[in-house]
Image (spheres, rainbow, N blue to C red):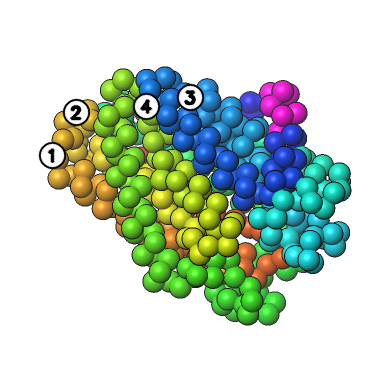
Amino acid sequence: MEFDLLWLVASFGGGAFGAAIGGQTAFIFTGILYMIGLGGYLGGVDMGWFMGSIVFGPVFGPHIAFLGGAGAAAYAAKKGVMAGGANGRDIVTPLAGIGRSDVLAVGGIVGMVGYLVNNLLAEVPALSVSDPDLHYGAEVIGWTDTVALTIVVVSIAVRFIWGSTGLFSTKDHALLAVGEGKHWVEHQEGWGISAMHGLTSGIMSAFATIWLVVFIFPTAPGIVNHAQLVGWAISAITLIFLSLGMKTPVTHHMTIVASIAALKFAPILAGTSDVTAWDGDVMIVVAVIIGGIFGALAGVLGEALSRMTNANGDTHIDPPAFAIWIGTSVLYVLTAILA
């Protein structure tokens, strides 16, 4: 397992800071910083170092900063110090307002655990393609989104350490029922509207991803490692408005899964990773539509996972991370088979 003491120490700071400002706010900053990195790519600069160390490293990596905030909220709720008696699912409230060092320390420790677990998961052997020309010249695919899976694994552990409802929260409700007054995102919890948000935001994100690859890949091939996150970052930034009380949809699981689908299917359907040959190819349109379909599936999956593990629980198990892990894993397997 790759291990760096400096990054581990920094992860304590990142997790504690995520707790101080609130997990959701930390995640919003991840999206903002990604857009700064994307700006560098658009300017012809290889921003891989920035994406890896700042955006997805100890500073605002979701498996560190967001997870630190979520874990600290569960601990604070267990101690009975959450403002207004809120339960451990509150990832919005900045925990700095509690004024307790132990809460921030728990956030830091959870951030360190997130760093270690993500590195451990990265050691799982990656899937590969037989024809690299159908995968942007790269043989290795990966095996899943390890950041998303880290959030799921550690959040489940947090539920059993500081929560009391169990993983599937079925003490008072059927598995897919929504408890009275217990919602994840109430204004999008219908199956139809979840699918519609996924389809529409997914098409938007898939198009943006394909266009970034078309224009940047010839001069900066590293963009294929980050282009799938453009819609995800936009979705993350829109959570500012949700935090302000506006009925904004939560779509980052939909947009990233849609973009990954389009990114993986485009060269397979076009028969080449030469993006200059994609102009006017109807198969690229098909890839974007496939992205939208996967976005809709991710929307429904996220809602189902919310009802099963989060909405009726007393700590936060992130439905988008859960859906991203599953969706990414499926798409990587499909890519390995088809390419």
Circles 1 and 4, Cβ within 8 Å, touching? The answer is: no
> How many residues crowd around disc 2 within 10 Å: few (fewer than 14), some, or many (20 or more)?
few
Q: Amino acid at mark 2?
A: Thr
Label 3 belongs to which residue?
48
Label 3 sits on a secondary structure element that is: helix
Q: Where is residue 242 drawn, in percent x and y? A: 55, 58
Q: Amino acid at mark 3?
A: Gly
What residue range appears in magenta?
4-11
Q: Is residue 42 above or below residue 265?
A: above
Circles 2 and 1, Cβ within 8 Å, touching? The answer is: no
Label 1 belongs to which residue?
280
Cα distance between the residues tagged 3 and 4: 13 Å
- N-terminal-most mark, 1 or 4: 4
Residue at horizontal 43 percent and vertical 20 percent from the top: 46
Label 4 belongs to which residue?
42
Mark nearest the camera among 1 and 4 is: 4
Label 2 sits on a secondary structure element that is: helix
Cα distance between the residues tagged 1 and 3: 30 Å
Cα distance between the residues tagged 2 and 1: 10 Å
Whether 10 is among the magenta residues is yes
Mark nearest the camera among 3 and 4 is: 4
Cα distance between the residues tagged 4 and 2: 18 Å
Q: Where is residue 213 drawn, in percent x and y? A: 31, 32
- N-terminal-most mark, 3 or 4: 4
